[in-house]
Structures are given as structure tokens and as C-alpha cells.
Image (tube, coloured by chain):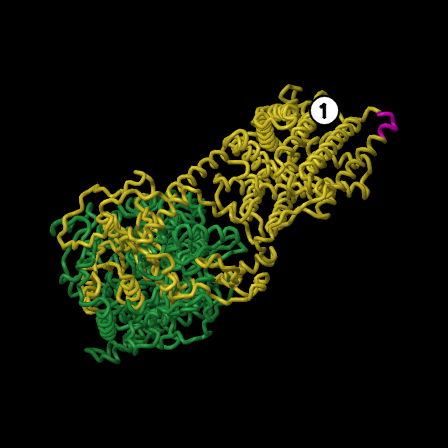
Chain colours: A yellow, B green
Amino acid sequence: MTQEGSSRPPVPSDLVPDLTAEQLRTLHQIGDRWTRVTGAPQNWRLALPVDPHVGSYPAHHQVRQPRYERFVTVSELGGESRTTLAAEAAAVTSTRSGRAGYRIRRVLLGPALMSTALVRERMRKLVALPVLSSDALSSVAYGPEAMLTILVLGGMAGLSLSLPIALAIMLMMLAVGLSYRQTIRAYPNGGGSYIVAGDNLGRIPGLLAAGGLVVDYVLTVAVSIAAGIAAITSALPSLSAATVPVGLGFIALLLAGNLRGVRQAGILFAAPTYVFVLSVAAVIAVGLVEAALRGFPPAPTPRVDATTGVTLLLVLRAFTSGATALTGIEAITNAVPAFRPVEWRNARTALTWVVGVLLALFGGMTALILVTGTIPDPGQTVLSQLARHSFGTGPVYVLVQASTAAVLLLAANTAYNDFPRVLSLLARTHHAPRVFMRMGDRLAYSNGILLLSAAAALIFAAFGGNTTDLIPLYAVGVFLAFTLSQSGMVVHWWRSRARHWRKSLVFNATGALMCAAVFVTAAIAKFTSGAWVALVAVAAFVVLALRIRAHYDAVGRALRLRPHSAALPGNTVRATLCPSAAPPPEPGRPEKRGMGGGDPGAEEAEETPEEIHHLSVVPVETLDLANIRALAYAASLQQPVLAVHLSPSHEEAERMAGYWRHWGDHLPLEVVVCPYRTIIAPLVNYIEALHAQRPDLTITVILPEVVPLRWWHRVLHDRIAVRLRRALRERPKIVVTTVPFHV
Amino acid sequence: MTQEGSSRPPVPSDLVPDLTAEQLRTLHQIGDRWTRVTGAPQNWRLALPVDPHVGSYPAHHQVRQPRYERFVTVSELGGESRTTLAAEAAAVTSTRSGRAGYRIRRVLLGPALMSTALVRERMRKLVALPVLSSDALSSVAYGPEAMLTILVLGGMAGLSLSLPIALAIMLMMLAVGLSYRQTIRAYPNGGGSYIVAGDNLGRIPGLLAAGGLVVDYVLTVAVSIAAGIAAITSALPSLSAATVPVGLGFIALLLAGNLRGVRQAGILFAAPTYVFVLSVAAVIAVGLVEAALRGFPPAPTPRVDATTGVTLLLVLRAFTSGATALTGIEAITNAVPAFRPVEWRNARTALTWVVGVLLALFGGMTALILVTGTIPDPGQTVLSQLARHSFGTGPVYVLVQASTAAVLLLAANTAYNDFPRVLSLLARTHHAPRVFMRMGDRLAYSNGILLLSAAAALIFAAFGGNTTDLIPLYAVGVFLAFTLSQSGMVVHWWRSRARHWRKSLVFNATGALMCAAVFVTAAIAKFTSGAWVALVAVAAFVVLALRIRAHYDAVGRALRLRPHSAALPGNTVRATLCPSAAPPPEPGRPEKRGMGGGDPGAEEAEETPEEIHHLSVVPVETLDLANIRALAYAASLQQPVLAVHLSPSHEEAERMAGYWRHWGDHLPLEVVVCPYRTIIAPLVNYIEALHAQRPDLTITVILPEVVPLRWWHRVLHDRIAVRLRRALRERPKIVVTTVPFHV
């Protein structure tokens, strides 16, 4: 998990990792041993019956429009190997459903994009600011309300604490903002929490941060959409019954848009944020000015009955709920390379602006809430109440609500950009399945996008789209990632001793301490009301990531090319004749090649053609064209062949033997009578016994398979080939070959 | 569909049909051509590296107890081929779920049975009679009631017609009974409707009879179980709410019992029928004697309001509903070989007894109904009302109801014996999927049993387990089969002119005419009330059977060994070198071998090893052990090999080419750059282009496949091998080989 490995931008060839110098040496060594068999390199030029340059050969200038050709030759890489450029997949999908799926995908997602279309956009600050800050700024739509919802439980005494708690949260914002300014400087290629924590603190903290982020992104989608729908239903209460379907519809919209690979740039994405900031600022300004003109009269607060005493727990819960207003503040640190040069300086300026606007909006809203005596109402958001208070229900109110909903949808879209990216980074270090590294038709990480949509839809539906119920889950993951990221920065400064390191260290340490305090507080105070879900999810994520890594490591070890050990006895073909009454093989005779002892796959470690000794086994059902052809295929490979016939009865066995003699007895036939009428099990048994007798042989099972034209015809045929392939799959050194026969 | 082919008892080797003399000649001819390649027969004895006699070799006397050995050698069939006896499947099933499934099957179904356990039981008449007649006799439990249910719609005027209609039905019974006596004599090996109609009338009438029977058996299960539950709920009305679950439970019981291979012999199956006959006879006798003692007073009939006039349609509907009492009468004709010798004479005597008892019970019940003035009651069966009238609600009443329910369950079990047998006969003549010919662990036709259970459960649940609603569907299929079977007998006698043929012909013609009348009447009179379902089902069955036969015929034609035509040009290996700028292949160059023109599969008609020209294609992802091993495997086959690398980008392509040179460039490498990041489609495209260029080559695609230990690890690997195999499956002359690598 080195910095340059994980923080460089993703490229499609991440899927094919480099070979190490060690591996290259081994490769060369293996190649030398091949020379003994294949002779001098490139004698294949004379042997190959097909010119590998198949298809049509357009001129070089045609390479750019590979719309109708299926193959386009690009260049010759030194003559030994040739490169062909594959065009789009359209014509190939063989099944009708496959073609239909392809057409639907093209209509919904647009034409497939070539990998070369993967360019980084550079954004002006004026565009980058709203695009990257929608997540952070939109959280004022639910942060203050989340705080009030808790405080109101303590009655008037509780509500009176809202000002100090809000001030504490604003202090947090300042500290976190200053802290992230340091991160931007140190990680000009983008310093997400996972990267910073992983680089500086080690693997487990990195994974914890990644787990926090992953849980956070799922909740960002769920909470933002829930709050966005609340903004809509505040204006149109009749819609509130349809919260869940409308929310799932929004998730489907985000899914489709992101599979299309919507870029988060452009005026379309910048406008709602500006409108939101300006309209909320107007609500605050009008409300406060009006109150000031009336000399701040004590608001006619409706009496609230305390359902609980004002305990420390209540205060802490209110604080952590309000702290959700900090979410999204890190987005700019992730996206430093998206700014124009000097990237880190522009990103830093943008961050300062965002934190400033956030502070102003949060502070202003809190003040206006206090002045107007607003308390949470299940049917209407606090922001909606404030807007009505300032502007009534006219067009300005509608503008506030609409821009709130729009900016929250953009915030959810931010998670769609970051979640798949984090998963792809994890996959690159083998902590997540490889599929998350694969880019779809439209250069988006389709699998990550699908997973996020599924998880968010599940959470959203499970909580009925209720913001208040979702908030307790939210803060935990965010502040875990914040804490680890900023602790990582402390270590970074301590190690690097770069310019101003002491000042930066202090800023980061402050941020880390405050975030840690919020994390611990949130985890404890809201454990029972939902935080446990997030904690369990993060823990499960880390365990899963470690197990996935362990599996990939094991596979990598097994697949690694090994320097060849000294020649072992039994490496030459044993061409001895085994007469019919051969002694049974000694049990437990040494068969391991001594390369790594109990290493998995050691039995399958042949590296050169001469090490592979063949025996082909052809299961023959009857002597028809498909079976004769499979026998001919097996015989034409010029390796020992053994035909096996499974017979349901002794009479049938004798009949088959008769046919075999009639044919001329060209290949050895073994007849197995199956008195229990099963086919697969006796055949597998037989092949296993062959393997036990001669573990040095690679047994190729050559199966004739009748492939009918129409899919429903398949039920009319025994699917022996499919079932046998599945049964033999788990067994070592057994190669399965299917010789199709189309009817 | 000759008589000896279809009417002999089933054996497991039906699955492997005989070769015709023509086929054997062709086989010999092909064998001669192999000799050119393989040399004198039996030189493989020297070449084979493994003794085919694998496993342990117990003495001959141990063959009978193959419980722990996995292979048991039985005999040597002339020395060329050897026979091994496979033991049970226990140890082989590789997956954990497979082993669990095996264990569950053994607990539920008992140990697997060897094919040699398939012996025909012979039954004494006293046992055979009740066992084979349960279906016929049990129908008096619903036949008279079904008739009354229709007549009561016509009010008192309708009910007054019950005596003449009952007499007509009894006349039918007599005629059908006499008619079937002739069939028994003519078909001593068992003459089911399908066989008789097929043998004498041709294919379509045979299939129509089979369709009628198949529909009939499904309805027998549904109607018998519905009537059986009605017998129970008449005594225990509180159970009537649970009709559907109880009925489905009974079907599950029949399913499990028949998968176990319950034999229909023994006292357990004979007792209920005797108890049923005796107790119903007692009900009739007591009721009639009591009425006679009282001088047959006019019964206090409750006034019934006519809901419809007494039309001809009503009479016909009542007649056809009552005629369902004839169902099951043919069971004895199917089972002639189950009697002790002289079989046909004993079977004939048994049939006479059954018809006699049936006439007595049906007539007696009708008389008692008239005397007591019983009318149908939705809450209680007519038989239950009669039993209460004769015996009150004491222990005798309970005995009547219990034996009725038991005998109806036995009647349903009869269908479980006959339905799979009919399907297996159809499968033997290729009119049904082959799976219906396969016998399960316990020597039962498991697939037919499963299909019958599913269909019966569906019908039963769809009609809510209501006998009255099911009856209209029932008569149609039965009487269609009866009519065709007896028409077939008429043709049989006309052709054979055996002893007494004139008398037999008259009896069968009478039966056929009466059954035809009932069939036409039922189809018309009850068309809208449900008969259309049965008619559509029979028609669909026939169409499906013909299409299945057409498919198997097409497959058989394609698979048939063909006499070799004169040697064609292009039959020798083209070892010419195609330089890098080869001219594109001429489109549409002749590639067909001229054997049968447009015959499907003509492209894949290689019959001898020398006709097969190889090219191996190895898709290489990177140069790790699994891929090197696949390359070594390919190279060791000593045939031309072409490696293909699909690269996501040009940089990666050049890197791979570098590795390849480093390794020593032992095999030709083609690099395909996939700018759209798909893997399967470009590879399939490439292989198709190779095939288009050289259609004479058999292309073997050799895929390295990493097989993880645990199933859930599969999501961590690209399943390229599986997906590529699926995509290549449909394409001609492409053989797919999977080289597994276990980690």
C-alpha cells in the first residue's frame, strides 16, 4: 500500500499487474527449458497453419473509426507478436437475449466508450467549488434539524442548549477545515482518508478508514435522498405517503446516470448549489433583519413537554447529530487533481471558501432558529419552516425547497463518484474483489455503482426513508474516517519534517483529537439508536477485506512462477506396459514434486511441455457420429487414449463390446457396468482411480456434447457434459475437453 | 411403434438403443479407415501408460456385496474390452451440498437398488383383485354423487331421471367390461390404451390415447384425493377449511412413497379395498332391508327448487358425470403379466369379478339413494349420508368413511404406477424426453413421478380441492382413451381373424361405440364447464410429442454414421505458411464435405483421426503458473498453437510483448487491444475469424481456469472460462478445453 501505487489515477491495465524482476528471471529460466522442446524460438512461423492476422486489414488511418470493422491492426510490436484492435462487441453476442441486452444497454447508456476517452477534466474554481461542495453544503439542510430533534426531547431546558452546542460544532468545522488544508498540501494527487490513513498508519487503520468511508457513502445516498424528499414533501405534504417509492426512483435515476458515466462538471451541476446557498442566505438574512427591526422580541415558542431530563447523554447525542453537518467536507481533498494548476493551491482556496460558507449558513440558521423559536415538526423540515417564516409560501419559498432538493440529489451523486473509486483502490491492493477494478462500457466502475445502489436502496427502504432514523447511523463512519485520516497526517508531518511541519502537525492533531472525540461520543451515545449498525458494518468490512486479501495472496503464491528445482525421478514418460493383473499401486507413494511441500497446486506445477504426460479418457455412450468424432479427436492428438463405456446392464455391456470389435477395436475400451444406473458418479470414480494409480499423468477427459439449436431442446438431452464438468472441476490434474456436435 | 418394441417390460438399457445392420456396416467401414492411422488393432496394449483395470480386484464371489469397494471386476468380454462393476455413488459427490443431498436421499428413500432387483411380482388373484381394482371400485364414492349433483339442478323432475340414467351407466359398465375381456386375451403382455391404439390405429391415435391417459392420470390423483378428503371432512367437518393443505400433504406422501418405489402388492394394499367393498355393501344391504321391512314408504324428500329445466343437455351432463364411475376399469388390462400363470385367464376372471362388484355397488347405491331420497349436500358426501342413514354415526360409520378415504388414496397411487410407465413407453419411441426413461436409485421412474406430483398438485390447488369442479375435466380423457383402445381392438380382430374373432369384434365394437358416444357427449355437454381444459391439454400433449419426436429424429439423422464418400480435396493437412500479408480468404469458398448437402452437423462429420486438423488457441492473461501451464499443455499436444492476449491498453500490450520475448517467444502470440474493455466478445470474434479463414481446422480453445477451494471465493475471480465456454458453445468446430489450476 505504497503512496504511488494507490494514489495514481486508475487505468484499465490495473487489471493486469506487472511482473516483478524476480518473476521475470524465473520466466527466462523456464523459457530456456522450453527451448529444449520447441527448438529455436520462432520456428512456429513454419508450423502454424493459420495466419494470425485474421479479418480485414484497413489502412492505418482507419483505426480511429472502428465502427464497422471487427478487427483493426494497429502496429507490429517487433515482429514476434502482433497487435490487433478489437472493435465493439455488437456483433458477437450469440444468444438472442444477449443481443437484446446489448441493445437495451446501448439505448440506456449510450455507445460504448474507448479507454482512451478516459481523461481528467480540469475545473475552474468557480465550477469546482459548487460541484465538490454540494455534499458539504447540503448537510445544513439536515444538520441543525438533527440537533434540534434530540434537544427537544429535553423540553425547553434542552432547547436552551442549542446555541452552545451549535458553537461547538462550528468550532469543529473550523478545526477540520484547517486540518484538511494541510492534507491538500501534502497530497497534491488527492488524499482520501483511505490513502492517508493507509500510507501513514498501516494496513488496518487504512481499511478501517475505507470501511468508514464505504459505510458513509451508502448513508450519504440514503440520508441525502431522504432529506431531499423531506424538502419536497414539506412543500407538497400529499406526496409524503410515497416517500419510499419516490426515493427508490431517485436511486434508480442516480444508478442509470452514473452507469452512463455522467461527469460531475458543468453548469448543470454548479447552478443548484449556487441557488441553494443564495436562497438559504436570503432566508437567514431576511429573517434576522426582520427580527432585528422588531428588536428581537421573545419568540412565541410553543411549550414543549420534556420527555427526558437534560442529561449529558442527551447533550452528546445532540452534538453528534448536529455534527453530521460536517459530512462531505473532505470531498475537495479527494479531488485535488481536478483543479487547474497550481492544483493544491486552488484546492486549498476552494476548501477555505466552502468552510466559510458552511460556517455562515450553519451559524445563521442556528441564530434564526433561536430567534424564531422554531422546533422540529414531523410534517415539515426546519429549513422549510424558516423559509416560510421569512418569505411565506410564495415563489421564493418554492425556490428554496426546490434548490434544497436539487443540492441534496447532487450530494448523493457525490457518493456515486467516490464509492466506486474507493472500492477500485481497495481492489487494486487486493482487498476487494477484482470486479470492482473493471470499468464498464462507459468507463464507469459499473460494479461499484451497482453495489452502492443496492446497499443504499436497502437501507433507505429499511428505514422507510426517514431522515431522523438514519442520522444516528451516519456520524460514526464519517468521523472514524476523519480521525484516522488526520491521525495519519500527524504521522506524516512527524516523519517528513517538511516546511511548516510543526504548524501543520498542530492543526492536524487538533482536528484528529476533536474528530476522535466526536467518533467515540457518537459510538457510545447513539450505540443503541443505530450506531451499532454502522460499527458492525465497518468491522465486517475490515474482516472481509482482510480475508479477501488473504485469498488473493494465496492465489498469487500458488500462481507464481517458481525457479525449477533439480530434476526429480519419475519425470520421464513411463511407457511401461501394465499387464491386466498389475499389482495395486502402493498407497501413499511419493507424488509431490518437492516444490514448496504442501503448497496448494504443487501437483499442477508443470511449466514445460515435456513435463506433461497425457492420457485421454473418452466416455462413449454409443457408437454414433458424435462419439466417433470425439474418439477421432482424441486419437488425432497422438497421445494414449482410453475409451470408457458406462453400461446399465451386463447384456448391454456385451452388446457394446461386440460393436467395438466390429468397429475394429482401434482403441482400448473399458466397460463399467452401473447397476445403480447413475452415470456421473461411476465415471468420476473411475477417473479418480486412474489418477490415484498414475498421479504423474494429466488426464484429459474428452466429452462429446450434442448442442441443440434451440435452448428448450436442451431438456431433451442428458446434460452429461455439463454435470461431469462440474464434478471433475474440483479434482487435480484433470482437464476437461468438450467436443461439440451441433444439430 | 411395433408391438414387441413397445409392450415388452422396460429395462435400463432402453436408454442405449441398438445399432441397425446398416449402421454396423458403416461402423465396420469407418473402422477400416482408422486402421490406416492406428495400425493393426490392439497395438494400444503397448502404448497405454495406465492399466485400465484400476482400483481393487475382489474375488468374483464378492460381487454381490459391493458396499465398500468402488469397483468390482465382473468378467472379461473376450479380452478386447473389460467390464468393471461400479458400486454405489456415495463417496464421489464432490461438493458438500451434493453429499448432504445424497444423505437426505438415502434417509428418505432407502439404499439404492441394483438394476437386477427389477423383477416382476406375481400376485394371487385374491391379492391382485383388490390391488388392481381400487381405482375402479373407489369411483363409486364420487360417480353417483356426480350424477345427482347435476340432476338436482332440474329439481324433482331431474331427480326422477336418476334411475334410467344409472341403468344406462350400468349398461356401459357391462359393455366396457366385456370389451376389455377381449383385450386381455389379445394382449397377454399388457395392453394399455396407448399400446393397443398405437399398434392398430397408427401413431396419432396412439398419441391421442396416450394424451388422454396422461391427462386422466393427473385427474385421477386430483379427483381421488379430493373425494378422499371429502370422505374425511364428512365425518370431521372442522377439517374442511384445510382441504388444500391436507390434499397437498397427501400428494407429497404419494410422491415420497413412490420415489421409494413402493410396490403395490401385499395385504397393506389389499385390506382397504376389501373393507371398503364390504362396508359399502353393508350400508346398501341394511338400508334396503330396512326400507323393505317398512314397505318402501315414500321418503320425506326435502323439496328441491329447480334452477334449470330438465333439458337434454342436463341429462347428458348427468350421464357423463356419472360415467366417471367407469374410470379405472382398464387397470387390469395393463397389468396382465402381474398375474400368476395362466396370466390372461386369471386376469380375465379378475376383471369379471371387478365389473360384477362395481355393478352391484353402483346399482345398490342408486337404489338406496332413491329409496332414502338423498340429495347432494355440500358439507357431506352422498355415501356418508347413506352410511349415517343405515348405521347412525357409530363405529361402523367411521369404518365406512375411513375405508373410503383409504381406497381413494390407493386409487391415486394407481396413477403413480401407470403415469410414469406411459411416459417411459413414450420416451422409448422418442415421443417424450429421454429423462422419463431413466430409472432412479430405487428403480422407479423418478422423473415421471415428480411430473405427476407437480401437475396433480397444481390442478388440485387451482380447483381448491373441490370434487364437483374437477369432475367435468375427468370423463373426457378417460373416454377418449377407452374409445381409441377399443377401436384399436376392432381393427386387431379384423386383421388377425383369430379364434372367436367375430364375437370379440362385436363386443369391442359395441364398447367402442358406447365410449365414443360418452366422449363426444362429455366434450360437448361439459365443454364450457371444464372439459375444454382437458381437450386443450390432450391436443397440446400430442403436438408436443410430435415435435419432440421430430427433434430426436433430426438428432438421430445428424448423429448417424454415414458411409464415407470419395476422398475430397483439402483432406490433407495444409502446412503452408501464410505470410503476414496473406490475401483475405475468398468469401464463400466451398467448405462443405458434400455429405448430405445442407445436413446439420455436416461440418462436424470427421470420422477418423486423420480428418481432424488442429489449431490450439490459448488465451493468455498474464504469464503466471496457470497460464504457463496451459501453454505447456497446448504445446505438449504437438499441434500448432496460437496464444492470444487481450490487452486493455496499448501500453499493456507492449509490456506483454516484452514479457513474451523475455520468456523466449516459444509460441506465436497475437495481442488484441480491447479499447472497450470487454474480454469475451473480442476473443469470440477473433476465434470466429480464424474459423472463417480456415474452416477445415478444428480449433481447440485451451483455457487456464483458476479453481478456488471454496465456492464463495469464485466471486473473487473473473469467470472468463465459464462465460467463454457459453459463448463458444454455439459455434461449429470449436472445442473448448479447460485446464484447471486449484488453489
Q: Residue at x 76, y 35 (%)?
A: A385
Q: Residue at x 84, y 29 (%)?
A: A291
Q: Amino acid at mark 1?
A: Leu
Determine which residue is flagged by label 1: A167
Q: Residues within 10 Å of mark 1 (few under 14, many from 20)?
A: some
For residue B511, which quarter of the picture? bottom left
Residue B335 falls left or right of residue A353: left
Q: Give B415 or A548, whichever is nearer the viewer.
A: A548
Residue interval drawn in magenta? A290-296
Q: Residue at x 34, y 76 (%)?
A: B569
Q: Position of residue A441 (x, y in %)?
A: 56, 54
Q: Position of residue B727 (x, y in %)?
A: 44, 59
Q: Give above or below for A247 relative to A349.
A: below
For residue A641, which quarter of the picture? bottom left
Residue A213 falls left or right of residue A675: right
Secondary structure state at the residue bearing disc 1: helix
